Amino acid sequence: MHLVRQGWLVWVATLAGVGAGACTRGDRTSAGPPGAPASAQVIDDFGDTLALASRPRRIVSLNPATTEILFAIGAGPRLVGRTTWDLHPDSARLVPDLGNGLRPNTEAVLAARPDLVVLYASDDNRAAAKALRAAGVPTLTLRIDRIAGFARATRILGHATGDSARAAGVVDSVQATLERVRRATAGLEAPTVIWRVWDRPLMVIGGGSYLSELATIAGGRNVYADLPQPSPVVTTEGVLRRNPRFVLTSPGGEARWRTSATWRGLPAVRDGRILVVDTLLVGRPAVRMGEAAVSLARLLHPGLAP
């Protein structure tokens, strides 16, 4: 379980570090009624065009966020491959594990006989996307770092799988919960926070991550929100200067903060202001972001009404 809880940190830090070259593109779709065959032309986040003439029946999703989304919009039974870290919902564990989402084993992916592969739009996945397309497999690359990226990706996946209406409902539900949390924390004092995701090098959540957005919605203020990267590399001295009131950390990270001689000079650590986050809940920019915002708000503001 400890490994599972830490897995999201590996995913966040790795993707943020290697995916900086990906760019967000628009999409052109032709919406139909729920369950109708897909007829979509999408420009993905590598700038490639994906055209689907029919609903895919065998989908490989090599991104934990898109796997969650596909289950939420009703396409879960069509998944024939996932990554090692795709563990939510529980039904995802029944889908064959094809290994890594970065630089995937294309032979293993092709052996699953997919008619759609969804990849994270990282530079490390360009070769895989090219190889899969060369083999005749429709391949869609999506980068989800921000809340808006989740909404866009969900709508694209809904259309590609033939259920735009259900996808829109998922987006509306998540956004409604986020807005309720935003209203509940409006006007409250926003304590400063830091969220470390890696030790060597020292990486924290920056303003380019949905986690920074969630912290703001939950009534906090990320001291590194001014840095545009999802998880920038920072210095110990910089953290001490910014002096966050609270430290947000994973269950396994609490002991490292408390026992490290490096951080004894940080008042938040010295005074025990370390908040343990449910990383299984907040670790994906997907359908549980509303729940994640509620959880963070209750951590930062214990007296907040339900």
Image (spheres, rainbow, N blue to C red):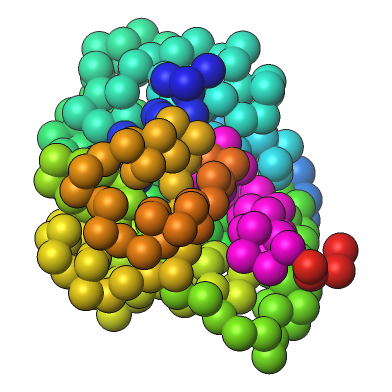
Q: Position of residue 79 (x, y in %)?
A: 57, 24
Q: Residue at x 34, y 16 (%)?
A: 99
Q: Residue at x 44, y 70 (%)?
A: 245
* Closest to the observer, 139 or 209: 209
Q: Quadrant of the C terminus?
A: bottom right
Lateral position of residue 158 relative to residue 180, left or right: left
Lateral position of residue 237 relative to residue 37, left or right: left
Lateral position of residue 56 relative to residue 131, left or right: right
* Closest to the observer, 274 or 126: 274
* Closest to the observer, 16 or 125: 16
Up/down of 137 relative to 93, above or below: below
Quarter of the figure with residue 209 = bottom left
Q: Position of residue 187 (x, y in %)?
A: 68, 90
Quarter of the figure with residue 231 = bottom left
Residue 204 visible in the current orientation? yes
Count of labels in the image: 0
* Closest to the observer, 26 or 244: 244
Q: Position of residue 49 (x, y in %)?
A: 32, 55
Magenta stretch, main secondary structure, is: helix
Up/down of 254 relative to 231, above or below: above
Q: Position of residue 295 (x, y in %)?
A: 68, 54
Residue 211 visible in the current orientation? no
Up/down of 274 relative to 243, above or below: above
In the image, farthest residue toward the bottom: 187
In the image, farthest residue toward the right: 306
Q: Is residue 291 magenta?
A: yes
Q: Residue at x 52, y 67 (%)?
A: 215
Q: Residue at x 44, y 47 (%)?
A: 249
Up/down of 90 relative to 142, above or below: above
The part of the chain drawn in magenta is 280-302
Q: Is residue 63 magenta?
A: no
